[in-house]
Image (cartoon, rainbow, N blue to C red):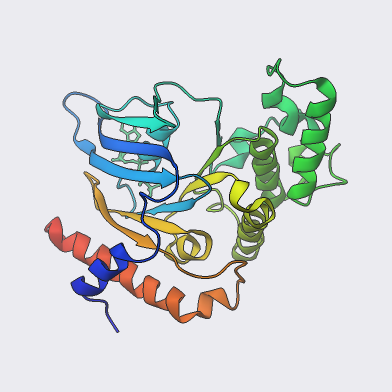
Amino acid sequence: MKATAIDRDVERGKGHSVTDGERILQVDGLRKRYAPDAPLVCDGLEFDVKEGEFVAIIGPSGCGKSTLLRMLSGILAPTSGQVRLRGQLVNSPPPEMALVFQDYTRSLYPWLTVEKNVRFPLARRRDIAAADKTSRVAEAIATVGLSGFEKYHPGQLSGGMQQRVAIARALAFQPEILLLDEPFASVDALTKEGLEDTLLGIRDRLGDSGNTMLMVTHDIDEAIYLADRIVVLSKPPCVVAEELIVDIDRPRSQVETRSHPEFLRIRALVHDIMGLTDQRHGSH
Ligand SMILES: Nc1ncnc2c1ncn2[C@@H]1O[C@H](COP(=O)(O)OP(=O)(O)OP(=O)(O)O)[C@@H](O)[C@H]1O
């Protein structure tokens, strides 16, 4: 059954609101144009992320998801608007954030072992003792299930294992916020499920004190399976079309969660919103 506009209003007010809990990230009127004569990519994005929350960002292809994530991470300046991390303006990559990209082949150093790849971003951290770096690296590698592969090079690992290395590297940094840009888009379906569960396992293990995670994906089912809240973007120039609470118990399971009535309801709702988004922008 298709969801109505009333359903969506109910949905928006459902569960805990984004004003509950501590806001860790505030996105305020974010606009982006890559050049003065280029079209607007983002047109006034507004949303908050709460501490410990898993937020998925979905939207049509080319709507500006990666652009948004790059602005959130401070590596791309917005044309106007602001990103604030714990109230502080983000205008360069904050040390509290780590990023995992889709293309693990370009994010790992092929000449370094797994262990050295994971340790690499810690090299310049003078505030962490060498022994602590070693234990953090070992723990992160174990968390993603790669113990025993420390001395391997990326080229000796499967694509899914390489993406695990990229995730371990981000985890070893112990970021307060982990930003993930379509991290599982380049692996096969079965590997993808394993990686999704690795990510959820990390969150479930760490509980409320766990990392805040923000993930861009074009996969609606993946967004529902992983997230506490979904931010749906419109076609470009993108705005937030809708925010949906995913009120499904954790731990989640690939078989049971994906057939849960709430999962199916939200999936229908997202499809409906994406359809409405098309109409708002006058194209199909
Ligand atoms: N460095 C850049 N310079 C100029 N334009 C860019 C740049 N990066 C992205 N764009 C443009 O911004 C728009 C949004 O691109 P972006 O990659 O952010 O979208 P996306 O939603 O992540 O896409 P996809 O779903 O296909 O991954 C596109 O029209 C793209 O051409």
In the image, residue 42 sits, relative to residue 144, either above or below, namely above
83 left or right, relative to 106: left
Residue 6 vs residue 158, the one in the foreground: 6
| Residue 206 placement (x, y as % from top left) | 67, 50
Please indicate, yes or no, whether residue 156 appears anywhere in the rendered image: no
| Residue 262 placement (x, y as % from top left) | 43, 76
Taking the spot 20% from the left edge, 65% from the top edge, the residue there is 276
Taking the spot 39% from the left edge, 65% from the top edge, the residue there is 15
In the image, residue 31 sits, relative to residue 3, either above or below, namely above
Which quadrant: the C terminus? bottom left
| Residue 223 placement (x, y as % from top left) | 46, 60
Residue 7 vs residue 68, the one in the foreground: 7
Quadrant of the image occupied by residue 246: bottom left
Please indicate, yes or no, whether residue 106 appears anywhere in the rendered image: yes
Quadrant of the image occupied by residue 97: top right
Residue 77 vs residue 111, the one in the foreground: 77
In the image, residue 80 sits, relative to residue 65, either above or below, namely above
243 left or right, relative to 168: left
142 left or right, relative to 269: right
